[in-house]
Amino acid sequence: MKLKLKGSSSTVELNDASFGVAYNEPLVHQVVTAYLAGARQGTKAQKNRSEKRGGGTKPWRQKGTGRARAGTIRSPIWTGGGRTFAARPRDYDQKVNRKMYRGAMRAMLSELVRQDRLLLLDGFGVSAPKTKELKTKLEQLEVSNVLIVVEGFDENLALAARNLVNVDVLEADSVDPVSLVGHDNVLMTVAAAKQLEQRLG
């Protein structure tokens, strides 16, 4: 597959196995959902009646008071009592096989190519950590909500992008399904695209 570089007449050859496969919506949905679920902490916890402090003695005798029977002041129907169905810490992780993950990534990248939302450049960066410079470059490319994928960590680019809304910078090794679906466009260097090819190969 040959893709034209943004703002240039030259093209670059990309592997059809990574950038030219059919879109599998159920697979993409499952992988994205699992990725988001794995980010949940699941540390919520509440106390049931046995974990509440106090309530060791019967509040009043069983019969003769005219009041309802009660065995403990830590009953769920009492103020300060335990929770009936107390929440417990839980793990939200969902199993995703390596083959499924790679298949979903390939499908997403291929769909970006088909929709002309993947913009390839020979290189991309800023001379200084200046947000204004990066914003000007993105305006020239006519993109706003964009994920910038580079081959290696660029401190100037990371510092310039962190104050822009809907603009994120990732290395090719750190691209994930949620970042791909969370932006309208993906701006990628040729070297980063080649790294993704190897990663998904």
Image (spheres, rainbow, N blue to C red):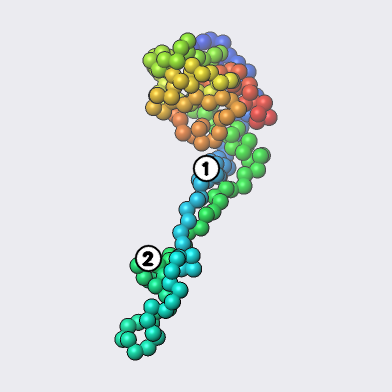
Q: Which residue is depicted at the point 59% across and 34% down?
A: 105
Q: Which residue is depicted at the point 49% across and 16% down?
A: 156
Q: Dot 2: what SS? A: loop
Q: How many numbered marks appear?
A: 2
Q: Give, as a three-letter code, the residue at label 1.
A: Ala
Q: Nearer the viewer, residue 152 or 43?
A: 43
**Residue positioned most to the left:** 66
Left or right: 55, with 190 as reference point: left
Which residue position holds label 1?
39
User: Where is residue 44 drawn, in percent x and y?
Assistant: 47, 53
Q: Which residue is depicted at the point 51% across and 50% down?
A: 42
**Residue positioned most to the bottom:** 64
User: Where is residue 99 drawn, in percent x and y?
Assistant: 66, 39
Q: Which residue is depicted at the point 58% across and 25% down?
A: 172
Q: Dot 1: what SS? A: loop
Q: Which mark is residue 5?
A: none
Which numbered disc, 1 or 2, marks the residue that appears first in the sequence? Answer: 1
CB-based contact (under 8 Å), mark 1 and mark 2: no
User: Where is residue 96 drawn, in percent x and y?
Assistant: 62, 44
Q: Nearer the viewer, residue 136 or 70?
A: 70
Which residue position holds label 2?
80
Crowd band around label 1 with a 10 angstrom C-alpha radius: few (<14), some (14–19), many (20+): few
Q: Can residue 26 be seen in this snapshot?
A: no
Crowd band around label 2 with a 10 angstrom C-alpha radius: few (<14), some (14–19), many (20+): few
Q: Can residue 108 be seen in this snapshot?
A: yes
Left or right: 43, with 1 as reference point: left
Q: Determine the CA span between mark 1 and mark 2.
A: 33 Å
